[in-house]
Amino acid sequence: MTMAWRIFAASWKHFARNLWIGLATVVVFTMALLSVNVLLGANAIAERVVALLEERIDVTVTFNPGTPEGVLNQARFYIASLDQTERAELVSAEQALEEFKKRNANNPKILEALTELSGNPLGAQLIIKAKHPDDYPFLLDVVRGPQYSSFVRTSSYDDHKTAIAQIQQIGSQVRLFASGLVVVFILFGLLAAFNAIRVAIYTQREEIAIMRLVGASSSFIRMPFVLEGVWIALLASMLTFGFVVIGIEILDPRLTFLFDGMDTGLKSFFEMNALSLILIQAGGLSALSAAVSWIAVGRYIKR
């Protein structure tokens, strides 16, 4: 117990002795962790944007006027029963005509042309919402199959096809880019912080040599520096956690209006993953800092 207390006290003594170097290291660690969390937050927002855009995409299948109601209901029930379908809504020809009139309420020429027609020129519509954008080609193939092809006039999938592909591409690129930046920031941040720790150890190389001469064990010499690296990592993690909480509270309400009052994905991401993020970042940084401190001190012990 006495030995453990001496090591613990010595670790804080080393930190106080090299206070400015220690604080600089804390700042470097904090900047590295903040960079990681900023990129994670940006990735969460980007994923939310992509998800919202995907949610707003659906496909409208327009049937020929006069298509029997039995065929329409059968098509709706069949499409709705498929695992790839999230929702299938049937709009009658009358409802389609009313919606068309509303959309063109400011265009008197179109409305006048409708009054000259003897009947309803529009057919019923089947609005299909797939569970995933990749499912639309399959669902369209089903609707265009031999059973319904003679009744189908058009579908809006071709209009949405490019948008769907672009959304998927944007989502993939954002995830890949964010992941790459996270790795880069972690590497550079750790390298800079590790060099700072090595500088702190270098300033006490003579003390290490003296301790070695008087018979101190390697573990007794190493452990205070190892613990010092752990304290620095934990302090940086605590500062990062505070900055992240403050940043989320400031940014999230300001971003809400861009999402029409809906969840931005930022706050929910950190709330759902708070424990794992803290354990991974604080634990990982502490372990790496301790390992580098152990290795760095070893260089001077062997001299």
Image (cartoon, grey):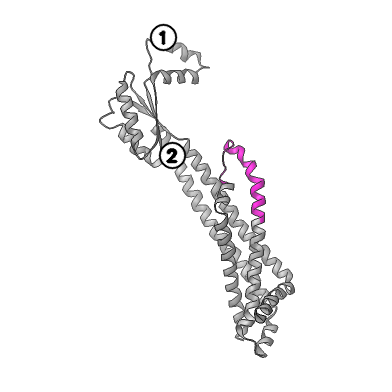
- Residue 4: x and y in percent read 65, 78
Q: Quadrant of the C terminus?
A: bottom right
The residue tagged 2 is: 164
Please tell me how many numbered marks the rendered image carries. Answer: 2
- In the image, residue 194 sits, relative to residue 58, either above or below, namely below
Q: Of the residues shown, which amino acid type is indicated by label 2?
A: Ile
Q: Nearer the viewer, residue 3 or 83?
A: 3
For the point 66% across and 90% down, which residue is it? 213
Work out which residue is located at the far bottom of the displayed protein and give it.
Answer: 214
- Which numbered circle lies on residue 251? none
**How many neighbours does mark 1 have within 10 angstroms: few (below 14), some (14-19), or many (20 or more)?**
few
Residue stretch rendered in magenta on the structure: 242-265
Pointers 2 and 1 in contact (C-beta within 8 Å): no
Callout 1 secondary element: helix
Q: Within the magenta stretch, is there residue 257?
A: yes
For the point 62% across and 44% down, which residue is it? 252
Determine the main secondary structure of the stretch shown in magenta: helix
**How many neighbours does mark 2 have within 10 angstroms: few (below 14), some (14-19), or many (20 or more)?**
many
- Residue 104: x and y in percent read 49, 19
For the point 46% across and 39% down, which residue is it? 54
Q: Is residue 17 left or right of residue 193?
A: right
- Residue 98: x and y in percent read 45, 18
The residue tagged 1 is: 116
- Residue 84: x and y in percent read 36, 40
Q: For residue 83, which quarter of the picture?
A: top left
Q: Within the magenta stretch, is there residue 216?
A: no
- In the image, residue 112 sits, relative to residue 288, either above or below, namely above
Q: For residue 90, which quarter of the picture?
A: top left
Q: Earlier in the sequence, mark 2 or mark 1?
A: 1
